[in-house]
Amino acid sequence: PGAGVVVPVAVLAHIGSQARFEPEPGFRPQWALAVAGGAALAALFLLVTAVAAAFAWRRRALAVPEPAAPRPGSLAAAVGGSLGRWPTLLLGSRLAQAGTRRGVPPVITVLAATAAVAGIVATVTVGASLDRLVANPDRWAGGADITIADSREPDVLALVEDPRVAALAITDTSYARLASGDPLGIVSITARKGAPPVELVSGRLPAAPDEVAVNPRVAAERGLSAGEWIDTLGTDGAPHAMTVVGIAVVPNENHGPLGQDLLATGDGLLAVSPERNHPLLTTHVYARPGTAAALAAELGGRLELSPPTVPEAIRNLGDLGRLPDVLAVVLAVVAGTGLAHSLLVGARRLAREMAVFAVLGATPGQVRTTLGVLAASTAVPAVLLGVPVGLGVARLFWWQVASTIGVGGDIDVPVGPIALLIAAVPLGAALVAAVPALRARTPAVSSLAAL
């Protein structure tokens, strides 16, 4: 299934970041290898199927006489009466726990189904988080419609009065020297109009000269959190401790890697920056909807506008495209096929028990209910355990990715796909269980004789 999906998609569209480097972008499949490998896999599948069928083949037993109908008031009649559903639940649960001596232990089947559900949930959650990051530049401090390099105060005042401008902020960018001697970028943001968006991960923004917010990447590398401090050197060379009050995504003005800057107040930057007399001033303009293009064209003739840039790390993540969704679909197909095979084989190996149950007086409906309980005993625990485990795995994985590139590590939970998965797994198991349950229409003695 994976080859059937990936190869056609790769031919129609580019896959991954290699599309930027190849003279002829796209994936070039080795058709000879694909055909030979497909034929080999098909032959191996047929061989495994034949071996499994040979081990599963059993001789037919002699027919047994058909028993008389249960007498009214007997235990068999009670089983088929109003209390008939309880024995099916008890028997189905007991058989699900015990399994068969020849088959895979039930706990292994449940764990495999749980792992499959967790993998699908983790994949779709990471894909949703990736889509949100790429589609919302505010999450990596890049949501300004217009960026003006080396801005001047008269131009800033004119933009503040312009009704097309919804928000405007000036960033001062320099570097601070840590007590260890290592330089670290430091940025201050001064809002001149409106409330420019700042992606605050935790804590709060700095409000005093000795306060600072750190980027998620710096926080992860140095093990920093709110309440701790960073030892820096002041402009006079004396130690200057700055308290960490929050973790925020800091804009990067030097077009370098994300996640290497601190966020301070204007006075805080001047207190630790060796270049206090030569800061790099940049104006970020957030235009009202529908006015950005006209405003940029007007300002471009007299001001130095910086073209919008996407950090390399964000671009590489965007190159993944729909790969997480494709992986989720492939995993769902493989896991669904495996679960269906496990349920069908388990029901077949319990055919003798079902026939004995029918001989004891169970109705075909009760036999079908018992098989449904067997399927639910695998599907329901897989969903109850797999969904939270998948969300936990996605949270850990996305936190690692986000902290590495310097953005917020919260996940975007796709409620719709997860709800669909929660409903599809038990429903699919019930449909699969309905296939062997159709045999329950056969008279009980005939069913037992066929074994």
Image (cartoon, grey):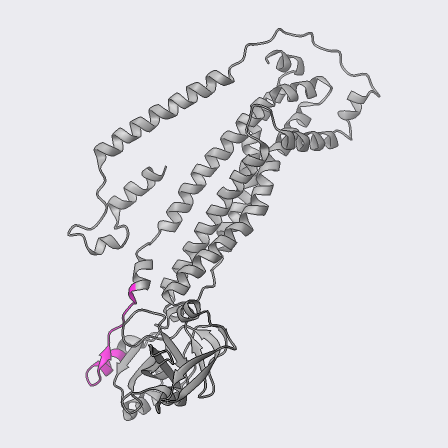
Q: Can you tell which quarter of the image residue 20 is in?
A: bottom left
> Compared to 200, does 312 lie above or below?
above
> Compared to 108, does 386 lie above or below?
below
- Is residue 297 inside the magenta stretch? yes
Work out which quarter of the rendered image holds the C terminus and state it: top right
Q: Tell me if residue 83 can be seen.
A: yes
Residue at 59% over, 12% down: 450
Horizontally, is 420 left or right of 165 in the view?
right
Q: Can you tell which quarter of the image residue 434 is in?
A: top right
Magenta residues? 296-312
Q: Which of 120/236 is in front?
A: 236
Residue at 35% over, 50% down: 323
Q: Position of residue 408 (x, y in %)?
A: 43, 67
Q: Position of residue 202 (x, y in %)?
A: 50, 72
Q: Tell me if residue 286 can be seen.
A: no
Q: Position of residue 61 (x, y in %)?
A: 60, 9
Q: How many marks?
A: 0
Q: Position of residue 140 (x, y in %)?
A: 37, 69
Q: Which of 347/203 is in front?
A: 203
Residue pushed farthest left? 23
Work out which quarter of the rendered image holds the N terminus and state it: top left
Horizontally, is 27 left or right of 183 in the view?
left
Q: Can you tell which quarter of the image residue 258 is in?
A: bottom left
